[in-house]
Amino acid sequence: MDDKKIGGMIGLAVKARQAQLGAGRALDCLRAGKAGLLLLDEAVSDNTRKRFTDACASHEVELLMLPPGLLGQAAGKTDTMVAALLK
């Protein structure tokens, strides 16, 4: 699937309030068992990448790495690096 389609789907999820944006909210969703998919920008720091990779493995949630800037652009907030899509 190309970046434009993925961005459109993320945008729809944000508008439908089926996405939690930001590291704190995404981590809370993972821990509560509400996250179905975690989206991570490839430009995140190594520490953040490791924290979410470990958390996804622990809670058995799939992790999808996105090209730099795509997540923020699709969500309408340029500084967004992490998002959790709800089940």
Image (cartoon, rainbow, N blue to C red):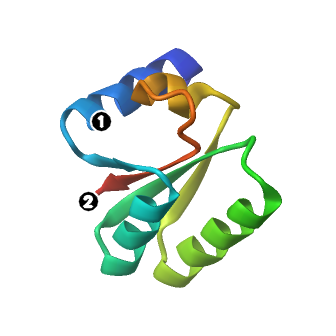
Q: In the displayed orientation, state which residue is furthest to the left.
A: 16
In the displayed structure, would residue 75 be above or below residue 59? above
Residue 8 image offset from top left, x and y in percent? 39, 21
Closer mark to the observer between disc 1 and disc 2: 1
Amino acid at the residue labelled 1 = Val
Q: Residue at x 47, y 80 (%)?
A: 59
Q: Quadrant of residue 36?
A: bottom left
Left or right position of 5 against 58: left
User: From the image, which quarter does the N terminus lie in?
Assistant: top right
In the displayed structure, would residue 37 be above or below residue 79? below
Q: Secondary structure at mark 2?
A: loop
In the displayed structure, would residue 82 be above or below residue 56? above
Q: Which mark is residue 14?
A: 1
Residue 22 image offset from top left, x and y in percent? 47, 51
Residue 21 image offset from top left, x and y in percent? 41, 47
Amino acid at the residue labelled 2 = Lys
Q: Residue at x 28, y 28 (%)?
A: 12
Q: Residues within 10 Å of mark 2 (few under 14, many from 20)?
A: few
Considering depth in this image, is 32 or 25 the residue closer to the camera?
A: 25
Q: Secondary structure at mark 1?
A: helix
Considering depth in this image, is 77 or 37 the residue closer to the camera?
A: 77
Q: Is residue 57 visible?
A: yes
Asked if the residue at tag 2 contacts the one at tag 1, i.e. Cβ–Cβ closer than 8 Å, the answer is no
User: From the image, which quarter does the C terminus lie in?
Assistant: bottom left
Left or right position of 46 against 64: right
Q: Which mark is residue 87?
A: 2
